[in-house]
Amino acid sequence: MSDTKKMNLTLRVWRQKGSQQSGSFKEYLAKDVSPDDSFLEMLDQVNEQLISKGEDPIAFDHDCREGICGSCGFMINGNAHGPQKSTTVCQLHMRQFSDGDVLNLEPWRAAAFPVIKDLMVDRSAFDRIIKSGGYISVNTGNAPDGNALPIPKVNADEAFSSAACIGCGACVASCKNASAALFTSAKVTHLLSVPQGQVERERRVLSMVETMDAEGFGACSSTGSCSASCPKDISLVNIAKMNKEYLKAAFNKKPETNLEEGV
Amino acid sequence: MLNFFKSSVGKKYLMGLSGLVWAGFVAGHMAGNMTIFISKEAYNAYGHAIVSNKLLLYGTEGALIWALITHVVCAISLSFSNKKSKGAVHGGSPNGSKGANLGSTWMAIQGSVVLAFVILHLATFKYGTHYETTVDGVVMRDLAKLMIEVFQQPGYIAWYVVSLILLGIHLSHGVRSIFQSFGLLHPAYQPIIRKAAIGYSVVVAGGFLSQPIFVFLMN
Ligand code: HEM
Ligand code: FES
């Protein structure tokens, strides 16, 4: 192992017991941190010390720790997932920081994402947006053979890059308006780019935008912070596509084809 | 349809459309005012031609009043609801490579200054002192005289400089944003749109600023 220099950092962590309680920042020392530690490993070590002292460990969400599940995420000095671009906080390493740094750790801030505890927020509003239209309900049968359904490469690429969204919520947290436009539009564009998504396209966009607004997310101001903070680099072009799709759907009201009722 | 205008996306279409009306107007207004560089007579004749064409005058005024009211009403409504969406407590804002530029996050402040500017500007010129002059035998309003009079005051020029720079910043973000709001963004054109929006704003703000400064220095 290389003889990398250990560092000491000061963490100012948002502590909040529950959604009904009010929270505040508390200071902790993270000692002897290796630059090779991931950010979450560093927090694990701080938590072990807290537990050994009989204190309540800092709650934060995580699961895969390899940047694919979208569970993790909090603000580090105002930036969602920390300062490094295209990275989830579980994939962020302490070599991004220097000895003596003071880091403010905060949960995602959005009225639609109430704090559950400390750095954990309730992101079920995202699930409700998906539930309102982010799916295909046409029966597509068993899994078809690869390439049985020809899709032009540009469309496939587009669908894949939009589908890369892991739903972590960094876009909402980075937005001054707590807008979910990037998340919602990534889902809309993903399904819009493939043939299976065509049947319900109008209903989908109308109902997902409606749910997004009803859940209390803000409007888009095109500041671009969402895309800049996105660990998967979801592009602002998705928002443009969603808006255009929404305009078309709103003014092109066809009689509802209600698939659920088999009509 | 009604739901469309109530939605966050629909409001952005209204915001963009009304912004576009004004963005088109300010470019035309700025270009027309360039006649002051030719002569006072040319400037007065240009102004007279516009007010004489009642269809053009009332049509433009109507569009501008509709757009201003729509823009300001949507701006107020969006600003309040966006604040509410963000929630009561929030700490640091994105910075460094993840940050947004101030031009885009301070739209409401820039807009409010522009609104004050528009009102004051109308009071000073449209509803200001009515001097008269005769150009080629036609009696018309001597706006050039009023303009020279107004722009002898350094305080007034300073206010113009501040307001027009803010208008330029507002436009540089706004015009770019329209492409996103209206769904006209395309990966290949993103950088060009950004540059064109900045270019347009610099021309409009710079053009408007050149006129009072020219008048101040020449008199
Ligand atoms: C000459 C006058 C003005 C022009 C040319 C103009 C232009 C624009 C444009 C093009 C946009 C972008 C719309 C979009 O994203 O689709 C915009 C946004 C905005 N304008 Fe203006 N505007 C003017 C005056 C004002 C005034 C008087 C106010 C407020 C009192 C205002 C407040 C705003 C705000 C708050 C936004 C951002 C909305 C958002 O973040 O969603 N503007 N403006
Ligand atoms: S824990 Fe799965 S993305 Fe970070």
Image (cartoon, rainbow, N blue to C red):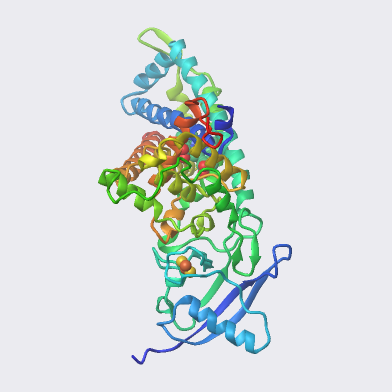
Q: Residue at x 50, y 45 (%)?
A: A220
Q: Residue B59: x and y, percent?
A: 47, 16
Q: Residue A234 appears at what percent x and percent y?
A: 40, 53
Camera-side residue of B62 and B120? B62
User: Quarter of the image holding residue A210?
Assistant: top right
| A120 over B86 or under it: above or below | below
Height in image: A63 above or below A216? below
Q: In the orientation shown, which residue stands out farthest toward the right?
A: A20
Task: Residue at 51% x, 38% y: name it.
Answer: B9
Q: Position of residue B146 (x, y in %)?
A: 48, 25
Q: Is residue A57 above or below residue B56?
A: below
Horizontally, is A78 left or right of B97 in the view?
right
Residue extending furthest top? Answer: B137
Q: Is residue B207 visible?
A: yes
In the rendered image, the vertical position of residue A180 relative to residue B206, given as above or below:
below
- Measuring from the top left, give residue A154's x and y in whole percent: 27, 45
Residue at (56% x, 30% y) in the render: B70
Where, quadrant-wise, is the N terminus of chain A in this rendering? Answer: bottom left
In the image, taking residue A17 as reference, residue B16 lies left or right, namely: left
Say which of A184 and A229 sits in front.
A184
**Where is residue B148, by image quadrant?**
top left
Left or right: where A84 falls relative to A106: left
Q: Residue at x 42, y 38 (%)?
A: B178
Q: Is residue B177 visible?
A: no
- Closer to us: A62 or A229: A62
